Amino acid sequence: IAKEVAKLLEMKAQLGGDEGKPKFVLKTPKGTRDYGPKQMAIRERVFSAIISCFKRHGAEVIDTPVFELKETLTGKYGEDSKLIYDLKDQGGELLSLRYDLTVPFARYLAMNKITNIKRYHIAKVYRRDNPAMTRGRYREFYQCDFDIAGQFDPMIPDAECLKIVHEILSDLQLGDFVIKVNDRRILDGMFAVCGVPDSKFRTICSSVDKLDKVPWEEVRSEMVGEKGLSPEAADRIGEYVQLHGGLDLIERLLQDAKLSQNKLAKEGLGDMKLLFEYLTLFGITGKISFDLSLARGLDYYTGVIFEAVLLQQENEHVEELVGVGSVAGGGRYDGLVGMFDPKGRKVPCVGVSIGIERIFSILEQKLEASEEKIRTTETQVLVASAQKKLLEERLKLISELWDAGIKAEMLYKKNPKLLNQLQYCEDTGIPLVAIVGEQELKDGVVKLRIVATREEVNIRRESLVEEIRTRTSQP
Amino acid sequence: IAKEVAKLLEMKAQLGGDEGKPKFVLKTPKGTRDYGPKQMAIRERVFSAIISCFKRHGAEVIDTPVFELKETLTGKYGEDSKLIYDLKDQGGELLSLRYDLTVPFARYLAMNKITNIKRYHIAKVYRRDNPAMTRGRYREFYQCDFDIAGQFDPMIPDAECLKIVHEILSDLQLGDFVIKVNDRRILDGMFAVCGVPDSKFRTICSSVDKLDKVPWEEVRSEMVGEKGLSPEAADRIGEYVQLHGGLDLIERLLQDAKLSQNKLAKEGLGDMKLLFEYLTLFGITGKISFDLSLARGLDYYTGVIFEAVLLQQENEHVEELVGVGSVAGGGRYDGLVGMFDPKGRKVPCVGVSIGIERIFSILEQKLEASEEKIRTTETQVLVASAQKKLLEERLKLISELWDAGIKAEMLYKKNPKLLNQLQYCEDTGIPLVAIVGEQELKDGVVKLRIVATREEVNIRRESLVEEIRTRTSQP
């Protein structure tokens, strides 16, 4: 009986509360969040830094729909395809939410027969992944992508992508970082000389990709146990993936008895050397690490791959954020556009994606710790009145100010108290108050109050716009 | 047999082309489009005009997820609910793509117990509607929403919303427009005095809403035939919905023998009068029409409603665009937040939504007709070389420029021809070329070429950044 009662109570709870009102779950979907005004202010700062960098490098901007035909995304993401959000079949085409901005970009190039473009694209992407929201891992998140498509001399666009990551991470002052670099051809060559069968390259690559999260022993047992690799091959891989360094390591591997015999590995190492030469000219090799354990999960990479990792927080109180992980990644994908072109014509591409949610999480926590006050509006002046019955005069004045391009607010009350009006300025950071009163109206002036100093000056009505502009212009 | 062959051929076509390559449909989903660099340049101009207006009025900005729990959207859109995109049930919560930004805003307010905010939100919304893309009607489209939430003195925020529509449409120079205004209370009062039963108010309101697209006769027959309204009631409605005007009409209806007896209508008309007084102070009544045929489709409106319509195109060649229809709309919805609050606490709201796709369609066609050249990048200088083997010098110079904040590009070739480099500037509108050569390197200078005039000057390397800044600064 107790069981039955419990069941009935549960059913009642599901059906609604006591007042018969349907029970609402008042939340955003799992793995998503709202951005309030304060968070948006931070987010727009980050976007602005990223966009100016992309524009500094001469990129155009494009946009694509949030969903694609399901088949457009099929077969592009390897084991991660299970994380794609599908739309319900409501008649018509089968659709999926985009998983990244790279596949839509390739579809866009093939569809419009574009063989040459440098573009950025900032938009949300969707993954049915396990969210870890305090660490900035969401199911809906922004990607900021910069890609260079076209047939060019080797490693020049690739080097620019790394320069961009370097510029953005330095600009945002997130603390120390390192950009790991590797090449899919070096990985494949390494797999070959270690004795991995061709058919297992991609799946073994996925295992290597986990090395930034789990220790080698675990990855090894996945390779041997789940994926059927011989223990000897796994151990040989284990030796290589420990290696990281700079030009010296590249030179050493170019002399490596086994690797140097493999065509793919040799090509990859040759290009890696060229890349490091260009990065030296850019003066950024100090933060670049050639790292043989870097694999990157996505199927479509064909050459250079890279990933930027924050090393530690400047703010030592936020200890759990140490090793917040990857904040940018990318690589070369020379075959993806050809998968969409009806004749298979290839357009070589290389690009970088900045993962701003993690960056944003860090900045949000920093800002909360610092107690810096962020303004969430840009209002220059509050139009106020000292006496009652001046609503009409306030409406007239604010309309004049708006029409002159001044950012102005007023309280939506017929007869607000002056104190409340001043308090509103204190709360929201509005620097000026334009006060209309009987006497001022007679004299053809407006009393302008400077909130910070409490100073008040009478300004002739026809000079008010100019006065507000002067007093609120940024140096 | 012919039938069987046809079937087999169809199957073959579905399976793939002659080369056994899977047949791809290379397109975006129905009712959606890509935005290329040129379109984005136009779109960003429009956004920038709209955002500055919203900021001028002191709005904060928020963002919400692209999907909501399905139940969040249920019961908010009346007959249009069938147009909501649902996500496939892949385990976990049932989700739908947002249909507008208003319901997510109300959910956000209730969830965060916010009773007072002025915010804007610019984002894409989704409707499984019949697309008419040349007229700017899409299944994925941007809305630019500005809303004022809070308990205030009547019609002050409402008047500001209309002022905002007026400012934006004037600013964008789309040609003449009119903003139609009505009030749900006036409509309901009118329905009551015409003899519409209470239970039919919403569905008859939906019929009235069609008057901007179909003639009265058709709407009347829907009311009488499909919705079972008496012919007499329909005819009485028919008389009212022909009326439109200004303060004079409001005064007349306040004296109307039947309407003035209805409490709701009287309230609505009283507020309408107040609204027109405020709009007179704003100096915008010239473009406002109190129009009894305006109904607006959405269920959640409770007071003032409005809709802005472009009257005709400035460009007379685009004749099919005459009456492009609504480019902005909005109204008061005082009950929506209460539907989300567990205790039903109400937060009065009024807001406006700018439909930028139609505006964008018009501007795009205008621009194509005018042959104005739009730059799609902001690059200030191309780093070029006149001789071969100067790739390293170009990389060094461009890196210096980037680090100094100069927007710079170079061709991704080891040894590009000078002519091709200059041609690239002509094509993309880059105003300056910084040319490195053997002699210039020896002399410690860079040759700066002004593309427009073909003038060339030698600039000392240490002055180059300043020189580029001066020559490309906007007045």
Image (cartoon, coloured by chain):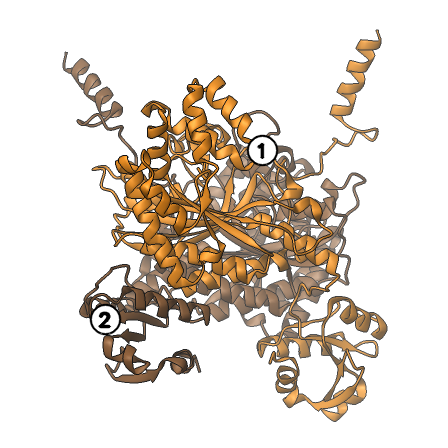
Chain colours: A brown, B orange
SS of the residue under disc 1: strand
Taking depth in this image into account, of A103 and A225 the one nearest to the observer is: A103
Residue A97 x, y percent position in the rendering:
54, 39
- Is residue A55 toward the left or the right of residue B257 in the image? right
Report whether A443 appears left or right of B92: left
Q: In screen coordinates, is B205 left or right of B429? A: left
Q: Is residue A250 left or right of residue A414?
A: right
- Residue B395 falls in image quadrant: bottom right
| Looking at the image, residue A359 lies above or below residue B14 | below
Three-letter amino acid code of the residue under disc 2: Leu
Q: Residue furthest left?
A: A2
In the image, which disc is placed on residue A95? Answer: 1
- Indicate the amino acid at tag 1: Leu
Identity of the residue drawn at 61% across and 33% down = A70
**Disc 2: which residue:** A422
Image height of A402 relative to B254, above or below: below
Residue B75 placement: quadrant: top left
Q: In the picture shown, does residue A213 fall above or below B51?
A: above
Any mark on residue A3, and which?
A: none
Disc 1 and disc 2: Cα gap in Å? 53 Å
Helix, strand or loop under label 2: helix
Q: Chain of mark 2?
A: A
Residue B415 in view of the camera: no
Residue A392: x and y, percent?
30, 65
